[in-house]
Amino acid sequence: MPIIVNLDVEMAKKKMTLNELSERVGITPANLSILKTGKAKAIRFSTLEIICRELNCQPGDILEWVDEEKQP
Amino acid sequence: MENRNRKKRSIALLSVLAGIAYIYLISIDFINHWDSHMNSFAEGYRASAEGREGRIPDESFSLLLNSENIEYYYSDSLLNLKNNRYMPAKFQIVDVKYHFEDNKELRQVLKYRATIFIIVFLLLFLFIAVPIYFYKIIGAFYKDHIFNHTNVRRLKIVGSLLLIIYGLQLIFDITLYCYQRSLIDITHYTLSIYLSGAEWLFMGLIALLIANILKRSVEMKEESDLTI
């Protein structure tokens, strides 16, 4: 998938655990884990909004597009 | 909770009705021609006794007849006992008994007899396999395990089995026709092939269609489940 989720990077920057973020944003740890590991098929704007608010970052900090064809 | 129980009851009721309909479907021929089937059992019993004594048992055929010439459509006659007059008649399906003269004649048609025996055996196996898979799917629906790849696979298997049943019936009909043609030629009539089993083709295609719809539904459900 050419969209990379950098949630773990942002969480590490803010020194926040998955369970802590889960409690703050009101999403189950299982669903956050799906998002973190890149298994998610889509993300709602509302989810993105509360994650950005809690991590104090921009959507672009969490989501990154990489060109698969240029990848080695 | 009450609504869910009602839905489960309707699934159970429909599956029971489907089971009855299936038994009706595979036994309709027996119900329609019960005397012919009873006679077949009796003849089978007699044939085994004759076989033990070293005699060649007679073969029964159900012939589908078409008029050789339309101008002589009513080429036979039946006696009307009400007025003792003969009525012109045209036979459509006639049961006949064929007597084999010797083992050589029997050997010449052995390939047909062997093919028919194998097909009947396979059909019996498939007639049992289809409801087993069908009830596995219904059981999964009853437990609310509807949208998963296992059900898609099972439904595809059911569809494929139904199509195989249709194919085997077609081969059976063609083989029986060739068998009859190799032994029988009647004046005023031509033998016709009795094609049956179109309902299996229809049900098989419908099952495969539903399997593909269910597959798409499973994909959509997965997409929905993985939307955070």
Image (spheres, coloured by chain):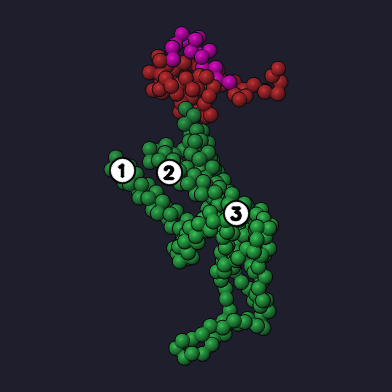
Marks 1 and 3 sit apart, C-alpha to C-alpha, by 47 Å
In reply to whether residue B213 is colored magenta, the answer given is no
Q: Position of residue B12 (x, y in %)?
A: 36, 47
Residues at discs 3 and 2 both on one chain:
yes
Q: Residue at x 57, y 56 (%)?
A: B54
Give whichever of discs 1 and 3 has the lower sequence position. Answer: 1
- Asked if the residue at tag 3 contacts the one at tag 1, i.e. Cβ–Cβ closer than 8 Å, the answer is no
Residue assigned mark 3 = B116
User: Could you tell me if residue B44 is visible in this image?
Assistant: no
Tell me, yes or no, whether the highlighted magenta stretch contains residue A11: yes
The residue at which mark 2 appears reads as B135
Secondary structure of the residue carrying numbered label 3: helix
Q: Between marks 1 and 2, how big is the CA–CA gap?
A: 19 Å
Query: Label for residue B5?
Result: 1
Q: Residue at x 41, y 23 (%)?
A: A27
* Residue B20 location (% of width, % of height): 40, 54
Q: Is residue A47 visible?
A: yes
Badge 1 amino acid: Asn
Question: Toward which corner of the image does residue B53 lie, by quadrant?
Answer: bottom right
